[in-house]
Image (cartoon, grey):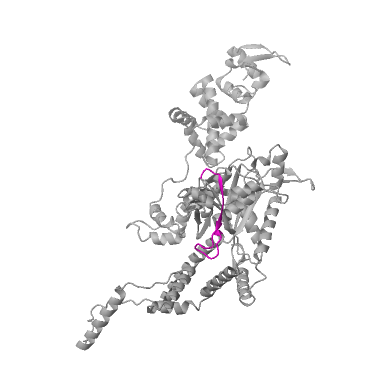
Amino acid sequence: MKQWFKISELTSLQGLPSSVPGILKKAKKEHWMARYSQGQGGGKEYHLSSLPTETQAALHFKFAPAPTKDKELVIREQVDQKLTDLKNWQREIFEARVTLYREFEQLQKLHGTNRAVDALVEMARREELPDHLMRCVAQANARKGDERTLSRSLVLSWQRVVRRYGIAALAPKGMEKSEVPEWVPFFMKFYQLPSNPTIPEAIEEMTKILPEGMKVPSYHQVLRWHNKRSVLDREKGRRTGSAYRALKGYVKRDTSGLRPMTIGQCDGHSFKAYVAHPTHGRPFHPEVCAVIDVVSKVALGWSAGLAESALTVAAAIRHAAMVNEQKPCGGIFDILYTDGGSGNIAKINTDDVTGLFARIGTTFTKGRPGNPQGRGLIEVSNKSLWIRGAKFLPSCTTSSMDKGVRRKNYIQIEKDMKHQGRSELVMSWPQFQDYCRQMIDEYNRRPHSALQKIKDPETGLKRHMSPLECWAWHVADGWDPKEHQLTEAEVEVLWLPRETRTVNRATVQLGNNHYYNADLAHYDRKEVQVAYFPEDATKVQVWDMDGRLIGYAWYDKNLVDFVPNTMIEQAQDQRTKRRKEIKEQQLEEIYDEQLGVIEIVARPRKQAEILSIEPKQKKKIEEAKRQLTAKLEQAPTFQVPKDDRSQYRLWKELDARLRDGETLEEAAVQFYEGYCQTASYRAFKKIEDNFRQLEQQG
């Protein structure tokens, strides 16, 4: 602030006469330090130190510059970090008090405490402070009414609390009560449950355990307290795992510095629409699997199967690696990230020696169980790819589908299957595969919100890139996709599933099939890698444990089965067996419910009526019990195997024994006479007759 003032700048200030002659007379009488004006207009100027104290304070506020926003920010940064918890009304009062107190400190340095306080208070009373300080006076009081002003006691109280506790002590205290009501622990015991009870239900249960004398809160009391809590506090205990983590913050993974084929994500999905089963034609939900490139978002590969399996996952990854004229994008990922599904973590894919990922050089990693947020890309892709495609089919079963129409369509499908054996509402398996290709192509050409924006060449408007455009952009930027691609011969060698087996007399066993190669005699009792064709059971590739090809081994029809079963057929047999066991268990439960359970209840104060049994009847009952016990303790001598092939072999043995004149036990006779009437017997008999005819012709 300047030190010399003209008479025109001193008129009407506190402590001075209101007229120019009066000021000149006072200056001459008190011998003010004066000089001739250095600027325009001439006349005398008087030094600040010669003026009265009240006038000096008035000049300080008159000529001091108003604080800018930058200065206000500096004030905020200098205060205690606890002030970040202040509400808006508390912050406004605090900042007004800080501003006035800083002005008081400046006056205190010039004139001392008492004179500074008197000058600040008097000028606030006469409304002679600058506008920004007058606004602070109204806010700093934190009282109702427009006529509130500063007082000497108020300013001195600010000084005391600042000296003792720091500048943060000028902040007003909150009006809310911080204590937790005494009934809260009892309420939370019944409210924080995964079953998500309502507030009235929790209050009703709470009243049963409240201590005597504690008042039961009303619904509105609980609701007011409940609404003040954060969403995390409200949902704690009611949501767990991924549902609760969805309310928390998340870490967004940046892929801007990566190239395509660096990281891939793979996930299976139960298609939310009915499709005709490729074998029996009944409607079912197929399992679809997509492989997504994390950087470009391109869906590089897909597969469809009857259920989640390792072969479905392997087929999707193989399709992702294929590159041809119809599919220019593809290759092998450096890292493949999946969930812990059974198809993903199966040994056929993850084994360190024979696993698919180890052979193709991909690092496999799986996410934390119950954390779908970590695989957000593939989870969202399932919605924009498979679920979106299912919504446009009449057999749609998504959660957003109208329940009435969904039930109507299901009834119509069942009716069509019953009378016609097929339904127009259900896609056939070839049609579904074509539809999957169409969905993948549309997804890859559709703008993706996670990709950067470009100017559309046709419309001239900005939009997000599509996955295929992002792939092309990386290629144009110098990235070479051929580094991740293989030839068709390499794909054929690497993608055949492998399992470790031990050679026994030049033969390796895979499932129920045996494969023979004379060269395997040199590897007797040694482990080898057996690579098989999922859809062809006539041959397998045999590799040593160092990765060198030994040769092909061929199925021998004289061992185990008349006809070899492919691995797909064997997997289907296992799946059929599991489904059969589940259905049998359900039937047992239905029969148990139909028969009911007899409960015997003893009634007090009533004596049971005792029946008398004659000696002859008593002997008959004991004899019957003895015979039944002996029959139950006797081990069964004849057992029927469960699988069809073993049953046919057993029938052949019984037939040979009967031809030799042996007498069969009753259970064996019943099986022998009944099995020859079954379809299983006729099928095996036909195969045996065909082989016999071929041998006779040869």
Check the picture and name the quadrant holding the N terminus: top right
Q: Is residue 479 left or right of residue 141?
A: right
> What x and y, as percent, mark residue 252?
58, 43
Main secondary-structure element of the magenta-colored stretch: loop
Give the residue at x 46% y 55%: 238
The answer to whether residue 246 of the structure is visible from this angle is no
Check the picture and name the quadrant holding the C terminus: bottom right
Residue 428 to residue 140: above or below: below
> Which is more toward the observer, 236 or 345?
345
The answer to whether residue 145 of the structure is visible from this angle is yes
Residue 696 to residue 77: above or below: below
Residue 603 lies in the magenta stretch: no
Q: Is residue 614 left or right of residue 143?
A: left
Which residue extends farthest left? 615
> What x and y, as percent, mark residue 459?
79, 48
Residue 565 lies in the magenta stretch: yes
> What x and y, as percent, mark residue 240?
47, 53
Which region shows up in magenta? 545-567
Q: Is residue 403 left or right of residue 665?
A: right
Give the residue at x 35% y 73%: 637
